Amino acid sequence: MYVGFAVASIGGPLALGAIYLPGTGDLRSAGLLALIGAALYVFPLLVWLRYSEEIVSAGGLAAFVEAAVGRRAALVQATVWSISYFLYLPYTVTDIVYEMLADIFPGLEPWRWLVEVTMPVVLVGLVLCGTIPVLRILAVSASLQLVLMLVLAGVMLGHVGAPGSSFTQVPSAHGLARGSANVALLFLCGSLPLFLGAEVAGGGRTVRRSIAAAGAVVAAYLVFTAFPLAAVDPALSHANLPGFAIAGAYSGRTLAIIVGLGAAASVAGLIVAEYLALSRLLYSVTGRPVRTLLKWIAVPFVAVDALSIIDPDGFDENVLRPSLIALFVSQLIVFGVFPVYRRRRGTLTPVDVLLAAVAFALMAWGLWRAITGPVAT
């Protein structure tokens, strides 16, 4: 179940392939960008794994920072990270309802407000069912997402063939660096399982194996789903929901609805994963029972989401940017103090410095893009 949770936390994976990856760069080199982007993700992943050799805590990333530079810095990191995800929960519901479901079911428009206010209540009810049932649901969801990624890739390959140029056509140096870095950032929520690590049988060893395995699986599936995009009609691959549009054009509405709903469900699953991670982080700071914290989180989640129906588009635009800025700042802290952590233990090596430097640079790029770039999910 923990591995399934780790897989579902990365994206979720179907959303990465069906929605987000087509917007990362030049799709004529989609396979190459996905491959290099997955390789770049190894750098932050290895930093998390090296921290977790000794630290497995409900504090997750904040516990890493505390071990490196102390409690005060850890509380700062935890605060910034929490702000990011408290904002993420409601605006992602808005994105699902007003962007994804609106495209899949145009007739839903008069009822979107009702779905908007109902979905958070349903998600809160789900997390209150207990951790084990939720992890089982996320594991099943992750498995189905991987199956749908194969189906979508198969449909594309059946219509456009296997474009080898997707791996051999190299964009400009700027385009290659930008596109592959954008792909790597799609994996960033892969750190969420760290917050549940203290509850896993096997401790740090299970955590490291599960997170590493999840990253490898999602990367492989994403590369396989990405490379046919090089030969797909740009009108489809650049649609609002590329996977939905491609499945509809190449197979029909039934598969399009399945892929579209699967992608929306994968994003909803990520909301649940972040909800669980937030509760564990708050537990590490306050010591309050997790179930109580799940209810506390529900109050601003449901309330802010209800306010979003006043101006859904404006809400999404105004909340997304600060959420992303906070997310990248929180991760910059984690990677910035990693060499200090290793030095204090007398284990700092040039490899540690390299890992931290590349991971830090990736987060810096994400922060720069969040501050200066157009608002986009």
Image: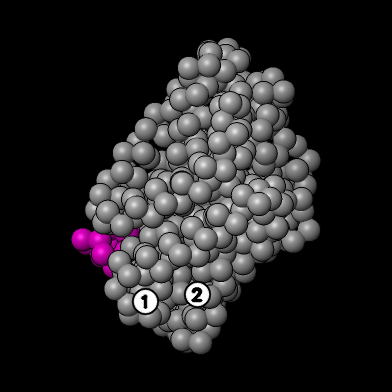
User: Looking at the image, which is closer to me, 242 or 289?
Assistant: 289
Q: Give the residue drawn at x 21%, y 61%.
A: 201
Q: Give the residue drawn at x 50%, y 38%.
A: 264
Q: Please say whether residue 357 is visible from this viewpoint.
A: no
Picture coordinates of residue 220 (x, y %)?
46, 37
Picture coordinates of residue 55 (x, y %)?
35, 73
Q: How far apart are marks 2 and 1 (CA)?
A: 10 Å
| Residue underneath mark 2 | 78
User: Looking at the image, which is closer to me, 157 or 58?
Assistant: 58
Where 93 falls versus 324 (above or below)? above
Among numbered discs 2 and 1, the one appearing first in the sequence: 2
Label 1 crowding class (10 Å Cα cut-off): few <14, some 14-19, many 20+?
some
Label number found at residue 137: none
Please identify the quarter of the rendering in which residue 202 is found. Answer: bottom left
Q: Give the residue drawn at x 32%, y 70%.
A: 292
User: Looking at the image, which is closer to me, 350 or 205?
Assistant: 205
Local SS, label 2: helix
- The residue stretch that appears in magenta: 197-209
Q: Give the residue drawn at x 34%, y 52%.
A: 125
Label 2 crowding class (10 Å Cα cut-off): few <14, some 14-19, many 20+?
many
Q: Do the residues labelled 2 and 1 touch (CB within 8 Å)?
A: yes
